[in-house]
Image (cartoon, rainbow, N blue to C red):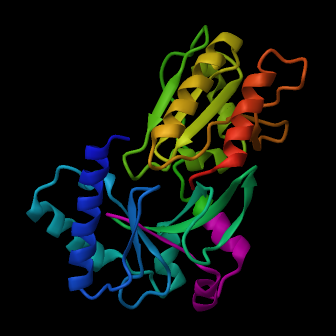
């Protein structure tokens, strides 16, 4: 990342933090790796993350309106009935504070967030006591709130690549947590589906074609390396039970070295 770009981002973060502090949020901190500001809003005990990418290039008034919306809506509902419809699962390498989590994939965990119009708030174990619900109920409710969307259109008769880009509401990479979801895309991608989630807002799905996968492994690694919201350079498939697992490539597989490289990169330095 160039010096000018880093300066632009740092200045935006400083501007956001100044406005938050003036609004009574003294603990706001900038996290450069994720290009986000993390804070605990007044009255909350759970951390809130404010992605800064949507704010790039916005006028001062637009920025003020955005932060006003965050301060109005960034709270966690006290009643379970109000909170349940707003829960979403997310795949992450890490999260701020003592967020509720459980293992999902190698180097990745499943977290639960409260979805707000402008931001998200991570759910903590302490919040479950207020709601009076179990851990399993929270995770199950969050997953049930995903759209479970399927592709529509003419089935592919040869391998194709489908790119899902998140608009902030779809939680596409989270769909990998839904049993059976990935394998249902077989007809639309022209074969056994293979998914890449190089950063939080991008999901690439294609068929299990060696030449095509070589290209996508390279693309995924590039996106993973340059994105401020990196997730994983690995590829994933469904196992016989419909659960998402890393793409298998034993020593005699033509992609063994490629998969081993992606696995190593993820294990050595996940940005979170």
Q: Can residue 178 be seen in this view?
A: no
Kindly identify the residue that appears in the image at 53 percent across and 26 percent down: 219
Residue 239 locus on image (x, y percent): 81, 37
From the viewer's perspective, is residue 198 above or below residue 67? above
Tell me which corner region of the image, top left, top right, bottom left or bottom right, holds residue 65.
bottom left
Which residue occupies the foreground of this view, 24 or 68?
Answer: 24
Quadrant placement of the N terminus: top left
The outermost residue toward the front is 3
Q: Residue at x 83, y 41 (%)?
A: 241
Q: Does the magenta stretch include residue 186?
A: no
Apparent side of residue 145 relative to residue 76 in the rendered image (left or right): right
- Does 127 lie within the magenta span? yes
Locate the C terminus and report the quarter of the image it occupies: bottom right
Is residue 198 at least partly visible in the picture? yes
Quarter of the image for residue 115 reads bottom left
User: What is the total number of numbered labels drawn onto the structure image?
Assistant: 0
> Which percent across, then down, holds residue 251?
90, 23
Relative to 255, is 45 above or below?
Answer: below
Q: Give the range drawn in magenta.
A: 118-141
The residue that appears at 54% across and 59% down in the rendered structure is 145
């Amino acid at each position: 990342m160039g010096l000018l770009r880093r300066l632009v981002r740092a200045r935006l973060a400083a501007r956001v933090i100044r406005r938050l502090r003036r609004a009574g949020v003294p603990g706001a901190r900038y996290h450069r790796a994720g290009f986000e500001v993390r804070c605990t809003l007044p009255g909350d005990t759970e951390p809130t993350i404010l992605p800064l990418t949507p704010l790039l290039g916005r006028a001062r008034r637009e920025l003020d309106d955005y932060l006003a919306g965050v301060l109005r809506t960034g709270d966690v509902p006290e009643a379970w009935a109000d909170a349940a419809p707003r829960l979403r699962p997310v795949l992450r390498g890490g999260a701020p504070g003592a967020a509720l989590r459980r293992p999902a994939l190698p180097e990745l965990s499943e977290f639960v967030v409260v979805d707000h119009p402008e931001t998200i708030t991570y759910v903590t174990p302490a919040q479950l006591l207020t709601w009076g619900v179990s851990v399993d109920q929270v995770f199950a409710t969050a997953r049930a709130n995903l759209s479970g969307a399927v592709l529509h259109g003419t089935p592919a008769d040869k391998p194709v690549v489908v790119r899902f880009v998140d608009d902030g509401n779809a939680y596409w990479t989270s769909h990998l947590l839904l049993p059976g979801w990935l394998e249902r895309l077989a007809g639309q991608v022209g074969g056994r589906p293979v998914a890449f989630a190089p950063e939080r807002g991008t999901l690439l799905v294609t068929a299990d074609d060696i030449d095509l996968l070589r290209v996508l492994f390279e693309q995924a690694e590039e996106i993973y390396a340059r994105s401020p919201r990196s997730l994983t350079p690995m590829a994933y498939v469904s196992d016989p039970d419909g659960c998402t697992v890393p793409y298998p490539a034993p020593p005699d597989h033509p992609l063994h070295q490629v998969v081993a490289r992606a696995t190593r990169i993820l294990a050595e330095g996940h940005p979170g």
